[in-house]
Image (cartoon, rainbow, N blue to C red):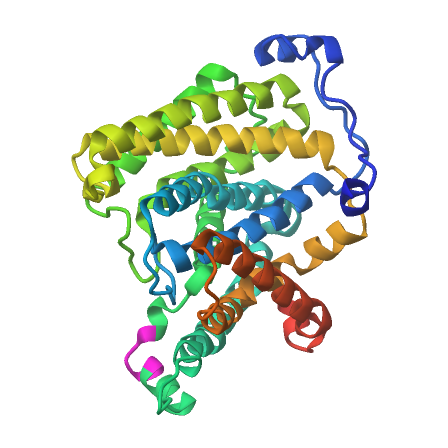
Amino acid sequence: MLKLLFGANTASPAITPDTNTISYEASLLAGNTVEKTGVSRLLFIDNLRWVMIILVLSMHAAVTYSHLGSWYFMEKSPVSQPEMFIFGTYQAWLQSFFMGFLFFISGYFVPKAYDTKGAIKFLKDRGYRLGLPLLFFVFILQPIAIYCIFLFDALETVPQFTDLYYHYIIRMNWLGGTGPLWFCEALLLFCMGYTIYRVITKKAAIKTPALPGKKKVWLFIAMIATGSFLVRIPWPNGTSFYNLQFCYFTQYIFFFAAGVMAYRGDWLRKMPVAMGKYWAWTAVIAGMILWIANIVLGGALQGNITPYQGGWHWQSLVECCREQLVGVGLSLFFLVWFRERFNAQGPIARFFSANAFAVYVFHTPVMIALSKMIIGWHFPLLLKFVVLTAMTTAVTYTLSELVLRKLPFLKNIL
């Protein structure tokens, strides 16, 4: 099955088998790194991208039933404490890395694009690739998504779409109508910031940073955790500014910058397997200890979750530390694991990769409609979450392949 999905792996081994047990600093000193294969496209990055986008769908499906987070529609079903713990653990751990990972991947491809095109053409290209899908969502898909909430309700009267759209525009609600495409908005801003940086510091931009060891990675984690804690004092978790959640942006900025440096230093090919293993175990063990201890000692079991969201609370500080430890650790693990195991694509992986961005753009109204349609299914909430994720993935990928990416305008921006 994996061979059908990903094809035969073309990656060279990162280190020889007998060096798997030594530290990754020793592996670096020994020169045990991945050799360049001559393949211009890093297929494991493509695979990581579409896997992360499916995880985005799963996050939104989880919010639909857990009520933890913000989403267009949440089913009014009671959530038991065991279900809440499972949903909370899944969502908190997923939030720790999945969006930051997408910013890292995006940042990785920015330097080459800038070097090739120059400042003006680079910005025009980013405006086209990111700005047009963003505008399409804001002025087309967001109103459709909102309309789906009314359309699938068993109401005697459904508002006219034209009336809904008129009020959406006239009341300036479109300013915060980015939905999941806030990612494109933020990435466009980051690219603008990178361009300004390159214009100001021309020579400094092409330095080749060395692959960081343990101490630098721990420092990286500490910096993001500290920044996140401080940002969450004025902007706690759950708040947003025109759909931009600043509580997570410390990680996004650092991960984007790390992606840029990873390209300059060729880190993705150089990271030894031992590095991925170390950070995987560190993230899982230390992260779970911090997670459970914070829940038990911080008052979450009694329903007091406010201190975890931000402010001068030790619960918020511990959660920021856990979040970034898990986020950085799992990201490093997935980069190494996918490079070693999934650096190829079979027909199924090519299908998922080609349609991933279209699925990201269009899944919102599809998921709302599907979640409304299965309200009457009396399944356990965890099962409904899995079913909704699978149904949304199947429907949006099918629509993308058969319809969306064949339409004249959409095929150029998707």
Query: In the displayed structure, does residue 309 sit left or right of residue 107?
Result: left
The x and y percentages for residue 225 are 33, 31
Q: Which residues are magenta?
A: 168-173
Q: Which of the 4 image quadrants contains residue 322?
A: top left
Asked whether residue 398 appears in the rendered view, the answer is: yes
Of helix, strand and loop, which mostly describes the magenta segment? helix
Looking at this view, is 34 or 277 the one in front?
277
The x and y percentages for residue 174 are 36, 73
**Which residue shows up at 37% across the image and 23% down it?**
289
132 drawn magenta: no
The x and y percentages for residue 376 are 45, 71
Query: In the displayed structure, does residue 91 sit left or right of residue 53?
Result: left
* In the rendered image, the vertical position of residue 67 relative to residue 324, given as above or below: below
Looking at this view, is 27 or 126 the one in front?
27
* In the rendered image, the vertical position of residue 240 relative to residue 48, given as above or below: below
Is the C terminus in the top left, top right, bottom left or bottom right quadrant? bottom right
Q: Which of the 4 image quadrants contains residue 178?
A: bottom left
* In the rendered image, the vertical position of residue 16 relative to residue 53, given as above or below: above
Residue found at the very far left of the displayed protein: 312
Looking at this view, is 20 or 67 the one in front?
67
Looking at this view, is 109 or 111 the one in front?
109
Residue found at the very far front of the displayed protein: 378
**Which residue shows up at 68% across the image and 67% down it?**
398
**Which residue shows up at 49% across the image and 58% down it?**
384
Q: Which of the 4 image quadrants contains residue 75?
A: bottom left
**Which residue shows up at 25% across the image and 43% down it?**
309
The x and y percentages for residue 245 are 33, 52
